[in-house]
Amino acid sequence: MPVDLERRDAVALLTLNQPKALNALSADMLSDLDARLGEVEEDPSLRAVVITGAGDKAFCAGADVKAMSTADALEARAFARQGQGVMSRIENMSRPVVAAVNGFALGGGCELALACDIRMAADGARFGQPEVTLGILPGWGGTQRLARTTSMGFAKDLCMTGRLIDARTAMSVGLVTHIHPADELLDAAMKLAGGMASGPAWAVGEAKAMCNLALSGDHRANLARELDVFSLAFSTHDQAEGMAAFLEKRSPDFAPLDAPSPNPESE
Ligand code: DAK
């Protein structure tokens, strides 16, 4: 399989599995990733996702340059649309998604990491949007998500120069929030995802959705939405359980993912 799905308790581990090509994303691999994400969404026992790359060299070295090299404008548009669809699916899925960046995250690989909610890097990982060195530019949301995640200045620096940065620099600009020795990265990512998976699924999903709104739309409208969603939390089992457990000094027993949701817009 170009993308493996492994169920580890409540966490789905998705592994891009073309290490000889540094896990570069072809159209087939993108479709496979999309299909695996669909499987996760349909399985209520899976409450969080970790995405990583096979091998010890790359998370993902980007879109498949060999396949792209002969594309015409319409084929390129279709490929960009496919990639943007997968990235948006990750960004908008109600489950938390962690990128365990175990090596190069370049071009589409950096864009894939950016679509995830939390990025954790191996200490030797390298990031970049080197598309301009190929005469193109990022096409899977990199110009937008990099500017939103770091800053306009840093996004322009990476997207316009094509230079690569190391994990420490990525940390200093907020592109990653955790760095681990390479051999500890996956365990750390599974632990972080496992913690979210055992949390209150509706609240975790709404916290993600609300953070996603932060850099778009109208600030006052977003605050009003936060007020509504916050209030709605008080109609959930998990709010009653979470607060009772705190007061009784015990661990909370949160509802399963397929329990009735108070919000008809949620998955
Ligand atoms: N695509 C295809 N194959 C790749 C690849 C890629 N992106 N990256 C690496 N590979 C393959 C290499 O061709 C090589 O294959 P063989 O020659 O062994 O068959 C194998 O992986 C190992 O790579 P290297 O031999 O080059 O390994 P090194 O350690 O020497 O170098 C490297 C590692 C990551 C620095 C180097 O491989 C590299 O620079 N790779 C390309 C990185 C890159 O430029 N990535 C950005 C790709 S462009 C759009 C849609 C999408 C996008 C843009 C626009 N629209 C349609 C609007 C997105 C674009 C991109 O992501």
Image (cartoon, rainbow, N blue to C red):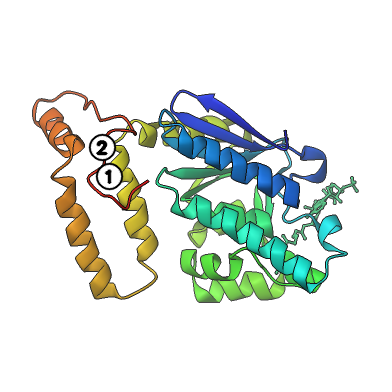
The residue identified by callout 2 is 260
Residue 52, placed above or below residue 253: below
**Callout 1 touching callout 2 (CB < 8 Å):** no
Crowd tier of the residue under label 1, counting other residues whose Cα lies within 10 Å: few below 14, some 14–19, many 20 or above: some
Left or right? Give the position of 206 relative to 117.
Answer: left
- Whether residue 180 appears in this view of the structure is no
| Between discs 1 and 2, the one toward the N terminus | 1
The kind of secondary structure element at disc 2 is loop
Residue 17 is drawn in which quadrant?
top right
Residue sitting at 60 percent across and 75 percent down?
Answer: 156
* Front position in the image: 30 or 185: 30
Q: Quadrant of residue 33?
A: top right
Q: CA distance from mark 1 to mark 2?
A: 13 Å
Query: Which quadrant: the N terminus?
Result: top right
Image position of 138 with respect to 114: above or below: below
Residue 267: give x, y in percent of width and height: 37, 46
Q: Nearer the viewer, residue 89 or 143?
A: 89
Classify 100 as above or below 149. above
In the figure, is residue 3 to the left or right of 215?
right
- Look at label 2 and name its amino acid: Pro
Q: Which mark is residue 203?
A: 1
